[in-house]
Image (tube, rainbow, N blue to C red):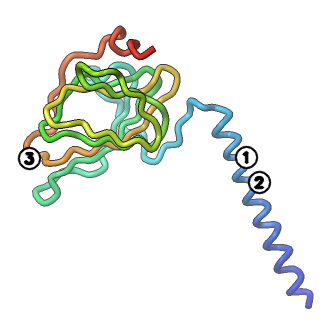
Amino acid sequence: MRTKTILPVALLLLIGQACNTKVEKQENMTSDKNELNAIFPKGEKGSEEWFTGNAYAIRLVAADSIHTTLAGNVYFEPKARSHWHTHPSGQILIITDGVGYHQIEGQEIEVIKKGDVVKCPPKVKHWHGASPDVGLQQLYIIPNTEQGIVDWMEPVTDEQYTSKN
């Protein structure tokens, strides 16, 4: 009879502890809204030839002769952004955390946030990066790499970047 009583009590204690841990984690996440929850390693700091500010990239899937698709993750610290660029076959961005901007040349800046999916059309000049106050983490997918990967262009000026505000 004692085992029947101890088991439910122990189970309730474990559930209670798990709930408290979850609440503590949620409180910690909301206490610093600028800190992102990383899914993948931060990666290597991106070149100043391609990024303004601190951006870190890691390749997750290398293209090969069977899967002609490249995929990776980029973590942008606040204010960091890519330079203007195009992709011969386009690009898909999946925003996994944070808040940022995406702009196609000649169009308004679009605010992007966790859960958004952005399709960058082939050969269309664009840029993307973090907002001024919150970083951005994104998965990138580049299909049909046999057509090329990326053509980098000039930096996004501070005036272009802040035209949203």
Count of numbered circles in the view: 3
Q: Secondary structure at mark 2?
A: helix
Q: CA distance from mark 3 to mark 1?
A: 48 Å
The residue indicated by pointer 2 is 20
Q: CA distance from mark 2 to mark 1?
A: 6 Å
Q: CA distance from mark 2 to mark 3?
A: 51 Å
Q: Quadrant of residue 3?
A: bottom right
Q: Is residue 141 left or right of residue 18?
A: left
The residue shown at (40%, 24%) is 54
Q: The N terminus appears in which quarter of the rendering?
A: bottom right
The residue shown at (36%, 37%) is 74
The residue indicated by pointer 3 is 146
In this view of the protein, which residue sits in the foreground, 14 or 100? 100
Q: Amino acid at mark 1?
A: Glu
Q: Is residue 134 left or right of residue 66?
A: right
Residue lying at the far left in this picture: please name it.
Answer: 147
Q: Are marks 3 and 1 in contact (CB under 8 Å)?
A: no
Q: Position of residue 162 (x, y in %)?
A: 40, 13
Q: Is residue 8 left or right of residue 76?
A: right
Q: Quadrant of residue 75?
A: top left
The residue indicated by pointer 1 is 24
